[in-house]
């Protein structure tokens, strides 16, 4: 890994940026990057509205660190305040040690953790604060009493962490690692069932491909060992959300939102990797001290490829938490996980799932045909905004549900409840008009301060448009900015500043009459 000490942190191409941006009144503000070795770099940020941070050379601040995503985060200034937004990075963005969930206020002296480096927003003359050293998790030195001390290859088992119908989990240590690990060992009965053993191997394979702070990390699979086992991240002090619900039934609103936001982040990341979990439930969500949620058990997850996109009629999952299409044995996509997350959110807020019966088949029937009781009927203290999130997540028709985890998290953000978003106000009447194809003349209203463009809201039949997140239009101080979100086929623009279509590499200001080419669809921007 290349550390931040060897990173390139630079302000790129001031001359290539639009010259008519409104400057911040804090013209001497600066972003200070502190590397692992204490080396500092300063970047002036006082006269620009956006600062893009990431590993790709097209960012304003480029961090040559493998823990940093190509397009990692965005910092911007609005109405006397800086805000930070994670852009769906692999390893997350933290402010003062807490993961960023949507636009987050950043104050002078706050530390932003991206990869192995720390960044500060500071005014002129402000000193760089000194962070305390990170605490290191101590390795267990003494073996607990009981059936411990036996070896699995080079791993020494320290204690049993839990037993399940399919496998047991043990605490272990190994000379190659500085921290304790968890070993998941399949039961003897599982070893004789080829299909279930394949699921165990699939969990390890998928888990090794996912690297997110809210997903339990799988390090390796030892299939040739006797018995076979997988090596996993040990979540110290973690216990399942199911255990938490057994103790308290209704979980406080602020804790519920924090935990669900983290699970939503993890699902959004997995979905972008084309992995659907298919068994989101409280028993598969670990809660560590500090209200840190970790999604686990990808044993029945599915990787969406051209060969697996159709449904096979098999019902996988847990009946109390399965989606309508899951209960029918139909094709599943990411929206099925969002339904299950809606069930979990309903239970956390009310103390019970939306459908309860002694008969599993009655619950499955209800998932397909019955509407849930509005959660406020069970808990009148639930805010109306949160209830709307729950009920939309539980829509029977996937197309009426949230189309992405990011969209759900936008509505679940408390900063949106009864208050203006931390974006500048947007002029009324701005819109995109589709200029060709079957949907010619259709308007996409830019009624929000940020609109994500994708195949879903442009043209479902245009397969050259990325699903979920192709491009974004943001409004800053009354001006509109177009940005490609790492789409497969790119976003193109021509108009007042371009004589022909050109691919955009960074946020570009839009003007009335500009034309966008997204996939094979041409759109016209109008104010």
Image (tube, rainbow, N blue to C red):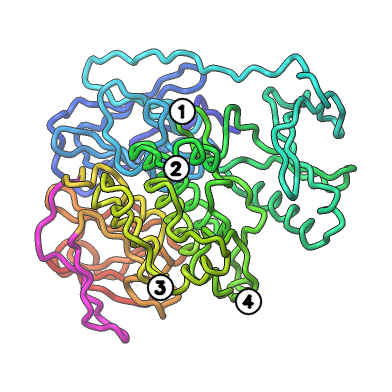
Give the residue pinned by disc 3.
397
User: Is 387 positioned to the left or the right of 162 in the image?
Assistant: left
State the image coordinates of residue 382 (x, y, percent, origin top left): 28, 47
Q: Tell me the tag on residue 262.
A: 2
Give the residue pinned by disc 4.
313
Q: Of callouts 4 and 3, which one flags the residue occurring earlier in the amino acid sequence?
A: 4
User: Is 475 positioned to the left or the right of 64 in the image?
Assistant: left
Instruction: Answer with the quarter of the image where residue 14 lies.
Output: top left
Gap between marks 3 and 2 measured at Cα: 25 Å
State the image coordinates of residue 444 (x, y, percent, origin top left): 23, 70
- Identify which residue, 237 or 219, lies in the foreground: 237
Is disc 3 placed on a helix, strand or loop?
loop
Looking at the image, which residue is at 42% across and 36% down?
93
Looking at the image, which residue is at 19% across and 63% down?
446
State the image coordinates of residue 102 (x, y, percent, origin top left): 33, 44
Gap between marks 2 and 1 measured at Cα: 12 Å
Q: Of callouts 4 and 1, which one flags the residue occurring earlier in the amino acid sequence?
A: 1
In the picture as drawn, the residue positioned furthest to the front comes out as 358
User: Is 320 positioned to the left or the right of 461 in the image?
Assistant: right
In the rendered image, the quadrant that contains the C terminus is bottom left
Gap between marks 2 and 4 measured at Cα: 31 Å
Gap between marks 4 and 1 measured at Cα: 41 Å
Gap between marks 3 and 1 measured at Cα: 36 Å
445 magenta-colored: yes
Q: Which residues are magenta?
A: 423-447
Q: Nearer the viewer, mark 3 or mark 2?
A: 3
In the figure, 377 relative to 50: above or below?
below
Q: Residues within 10 Å of mark 1 (few under 14, many from 20)?
A: few
Is disc 2 placed on a helix, strand or loop?
helix
């Amino acid at each position: 890994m290349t550390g931040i000490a060897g990173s390139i942190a630079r302000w790129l191409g001031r001359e290539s940026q639009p010259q008519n941006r409104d400057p911040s009144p804090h013209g001497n503000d600066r972003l200070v990057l502190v590397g692992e070795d204490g080396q500092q770099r300063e970047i002036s940020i006082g006269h620009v509205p956006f600062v893009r941070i990431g590993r790709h050379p097209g960012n304003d601040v480029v961090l040559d660190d493998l823990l940093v995503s190509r397009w990692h985060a965005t910092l911007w200034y609005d109405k006397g305040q800086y805000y930070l937004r994670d852009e769906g990075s692999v390893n997350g963005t933290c402010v003062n040690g807490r993961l960023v969930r949507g636009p987050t206020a950043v104050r002078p002296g706050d530390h932003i953790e991206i990869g192995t480096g720390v960044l500060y927003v500071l005014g002129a003359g402000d000193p760089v604060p000194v962070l305390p050293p990170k605490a290191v998790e101590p390795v267990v030195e003494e073996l607990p009493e009981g059936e411990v001390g036996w070896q699995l290859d080079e791993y020494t088992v320290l204690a049993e962490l839990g037993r399940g119908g399919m496998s047991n989990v043990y605490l272990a240590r190994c000379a190659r690692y500085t921290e304790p690990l968890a070993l998941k060992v399949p039961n003897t009965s599982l070893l004789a069932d080829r299909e279930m053993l394949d699921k165990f191997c699939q969990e390890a394979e998928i888990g090794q491909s996912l690297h997110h702070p809210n997903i339990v990390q799988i390090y390796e699979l030892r299939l040739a060992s006797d018995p076979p086992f997988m090596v996993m991240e040990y979540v110290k002090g973690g216990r399942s959300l199911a255990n938490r619900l057994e103790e308290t039934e209704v979980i406080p609103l602020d804790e519920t939102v924090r935990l669900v936001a983290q699970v939503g982040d993890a699902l959004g990341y997995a979905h972008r990797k084309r992995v659907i979990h298919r068994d989101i439930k409280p028993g598969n969500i670990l809660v560590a001290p500090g209200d840190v949620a970790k999604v686990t058990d990808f044993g029945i997850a599915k990787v969406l490829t051209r060969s697996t996109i159709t449904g096979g009629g098999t019902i996988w999952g847990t009946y109390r938490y399965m989606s309508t299409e899951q209960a029918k044995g139909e094709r599943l996509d990411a929206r099925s996980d969002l339904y299950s997350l809606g069930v979990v959110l309903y239970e956390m807020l009310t103390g019970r799932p939306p459908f309860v019966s002694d008969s599993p088949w009655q619950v499955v029937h209800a998932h397909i045909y019955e509407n849930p009781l509005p959660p406020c009927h069970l808990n009148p203290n639930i805010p109306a905004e949160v209830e709307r999130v729950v009920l939309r997540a539980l829509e029977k028709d996937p197309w009426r549900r949230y189309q992405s985890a990011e969209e759900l998290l936008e509505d679940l953000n408390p900063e949106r409840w009864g208050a203006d978003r931390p974006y500048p106000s947007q002029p009324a009447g701005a819109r995109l008009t589709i200029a060709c194809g079957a949907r010619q003349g259709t308007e996409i209203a830019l009624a929000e301060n940020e609109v994500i463009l994708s195949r879903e809201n442009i043209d479902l039949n245009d397969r050259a448009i990325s699903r979920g997140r192709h491009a974004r239009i943001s409004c800053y101080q009354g001006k509109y900015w177009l940005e490609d979100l790492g789409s497969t086929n790119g976003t193109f623009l021509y108009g007042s500043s371009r004589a022909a279509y050109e691919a955009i590499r960074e946020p570009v200001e839009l003007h009335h009459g500009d034309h966008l080419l997204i996939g094979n669809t041409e759109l016209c921007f109008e104010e």
